[in-house]
Amino acid sequence: MIIRVLPQLETRADWVAFCRREAPYSLVDTPSCLVDFQTHFLQLTLFQPSGPVRYTLGSRRSIDPAWQLIKRCDWSLSALLEGLDTLDFGSNVRDNELLGVHTDLSARRSSPRDPHLHAPDSSALLRPLTRFPSHWNLKSLQQLLVNGQFRDWRLEQDSVELTPRALLVELTERPTTWSARLAGPRLQLSYKQTLFASLIPDLTTDTTQRTNRLAIPALAGR
């Protein structure tokens, strides 16, 4: 999976911008955490040397208790996690002062077993391309796609639906099966030597504010 990486969630503006995303689901650098704001619940996965710990906070009826808890911690993810670390989850957690913001608020702590869970430091910085590479490898193709430096996306197989976003996921999960080669102005994208899509690289796209850092552990360092 390709996941956005945010530097922090320490202000109200940070949280509002995060929740306005199409999917409020991101890794955070400091503290090292995965934040997932579901319908009514806030799920925090804290990465630690001893292994990740997951906190699930919220209400079945409303998103308001989770928001009130964030506000109570002065909009600081760091303060929220520090408070959660002091709780005794073997007792009635709701009675704790930290969570005393709404009678409907529940809190759980668990150990996630997701084998694809990766900390933010496994991510890679994908800067916009400044020139065409002499050879299109997987990283340069990722840079092109994630920064939108192309035009005229074209599917070459009538029976296959493939979007640039889906291709980014494919490149992460199956990095050795995809290849790219230039044919005139078009960059042809093939899976196991079968042409699936093509595009025209275009470095004139304005990428000033779009340098992307994504969690792509399968390709980090390639």
Image (tube, rainbow, N blue to C red):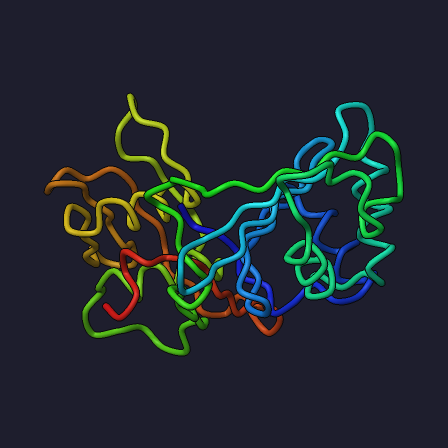
Q: Quadrant of residue 126?
A: bottom left
Decide which of 198, 90 is in the foreground and name it.
90
Q: Is residue 40 left or right of residue 217?
A: right
Residue at 26 percent of width and 29 percent of height: 157
Estimate the x, y position of residue 136 in percent, counting from the top left: 22, 64
Residue in the image at 48% along x and 62% along y: 147
Vertically, is 139 above or below 151?
below
Q: Position of residue 209 (x, y in %)?
A: 62, 70
Q: Quadrant of the N terminus?
A: top left
Quarter holding residue 116: top left
Label total for image: 0
Q: Residue furthest bottom?
A: 130
For residue 43, side relative to residue 4 (left or right):
right
Q: Residue at x 36, y 40 (%)?
A: 154
Quadrant where the C terminus is found in the figure: bottom left
Report the front residue among 79 and 195. Answer: 79
Q: Residue furthest left?
A: 193
Give coordinates of residue 159: x percent, y percent.
28, 21
